């Protein structure tokens, strides 16, 4: 039996095991998927190999550590410099990023989006920003501090700290931070949020399974809101294909979606 895992801190809230295990069951694939809390992200490759995992997903706050420790990085992940998927191939740790295409699939239901304000500057934000940029969408990154903004500036993406930010109209506001995951915090000052939400049409939070304070405020402002469940599903399906070598059909996707709902 093959074993797969989700690395994160915190990780107890993760629904990835029930989603992937539902997929394994649907296929009759001899594997299990478990949670692995990892406190020190710099040890991720060592932990992955020592537990003999065949593959893994990586969530906050370890995506950049996972990138740095991989033997080989493939696809858009090389530009993003953050990964959310590991597979073991010929005794080497191969890394991918399925967050970027997973996010684009998740926001399709909003229709035509031309401009996005992205809150946060971590590994998930990097994936989302480059995915949007590659799709011709204007994206602005807003982060508390300056020290994580160099990546976005190098890629020609407008970026600001809370202090330097001058709000304008955006179609979609995205929270990629962990604010609201285990607390009732907003991802940035309410004065900024009130201004941008009053002019936007849509709000998306990468956190899933709850109405975060950010989404609640967006709903109060009359926006169409969406949590991160579809992003989790679609990035998970892409990772699952890498884990198993099986192309996902509608039946597999629906079985994984049902697994998420349990």
Image: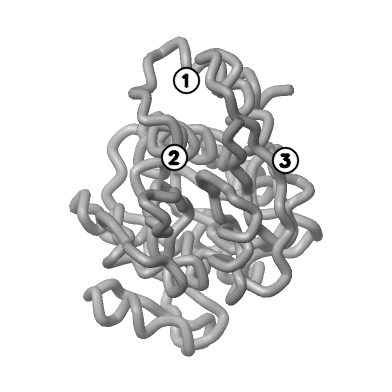
Q: Which is closer to the viewer, label 3 or label 2?
A: 2
Q: Looking at the image, can residue 107 be seen?
A: no
Residue at the far top in the pictured view: 251
Q: Are marks 3 and 2 in contact (CB under 8 Å)?
A: no
As rendered, which of 170 and 101 lies closer to the eye? 101
Crowd around label 2: few <14 · some 14–19 · many ≥20 (10 Å):
many
- Name the residue tied to disc 3: 210
Alpha carbon distance from label 3 to label 2: 23 Å
Percent across and percent down for residue 103 are 41, 44
Crowd around label 3: few <14 · some 14–19 · many ≥20 (10 Å):
some
Percent across and percent down for residue 7 are 63, 56
Q: Residue at x 42, y 66 (%)?
A: 70
Q: Is residue 152 left or right of residue 38?
A: left
Crowd around label 1: few <14 · some 14–19 · many ≥20 (10 Å):
some
Name which of mark 2 and mark 1 comes first in the sequence: 2
Asked which secondary structure carries label 1, the reply is helix
Q: Residue at x 76, y 46 (%)?
A: 13
Asked which secondary structure carries label 3, the reply is loop
- Name the residue tied to disc 1: 253
Q: Is residue 188 left or right of residue 223?
A: right
As rendered, which of 91 and 122 lies closer to the eye? 91
Residue 205's place in the image compared with 243, above or below, is below
- Name the residue tied to disc 2: 239
As rendered, which of 257 and 170 lies closer to the eye? 257
């Amino acid at each position: 039996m093959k074993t797969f895992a989700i690395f994160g801190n915190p990780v107890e809230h993760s629904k990835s095991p029930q989603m992937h295990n539902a997929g394994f069951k649907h296929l009759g694939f001899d594997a299990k998927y478990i949670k692995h809390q990892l406190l020190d992200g710099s040890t991720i490759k060592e932990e992955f190999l020592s537990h003999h995992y065949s593959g893994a997903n990586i969530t906050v706050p370890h995506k950049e550590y996972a990138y740095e420790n991989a033997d080989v990085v493939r696809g858009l992940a090389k530009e993003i410099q953050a990964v959310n998927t590991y597979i073991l191939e010929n005794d080497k740790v191969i890394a991918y990023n399925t967050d970027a295409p997973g996010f684009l699939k998740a926001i399709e239901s909003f229709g035509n989006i031309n401009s996005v304000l992205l809150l946060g500057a971590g590994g998930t934000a990097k994936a989302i920003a480059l995915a949007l940029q590659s799709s011709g969408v204007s994206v602005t990154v807003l982060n508390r501090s300056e020290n994580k903004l160099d990546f976005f500036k190098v890629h020609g993406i407008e970026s600001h700290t809370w202090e330097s930010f001058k709000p304008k109209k955006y179609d979609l506001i995205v929270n990629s931070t962990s604010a609201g995951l285990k607390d009732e915090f907003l991802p940035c000052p309410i004065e900024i949020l009130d201004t941008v939400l009053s002019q936007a049409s849509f709000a998306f939070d990468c956190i899933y399974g709850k109405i975060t304070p950010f989404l609640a405020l967006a709903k109060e402002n009359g926006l169409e809101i969406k949590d991160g469940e579809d992003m989790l599903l679609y990035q998970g399906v892409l990772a699952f294909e890498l884990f198993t070598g099986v192309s996902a059909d509608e039946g597999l996707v629906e079985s994984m979606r049902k697994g998420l709902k349990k």
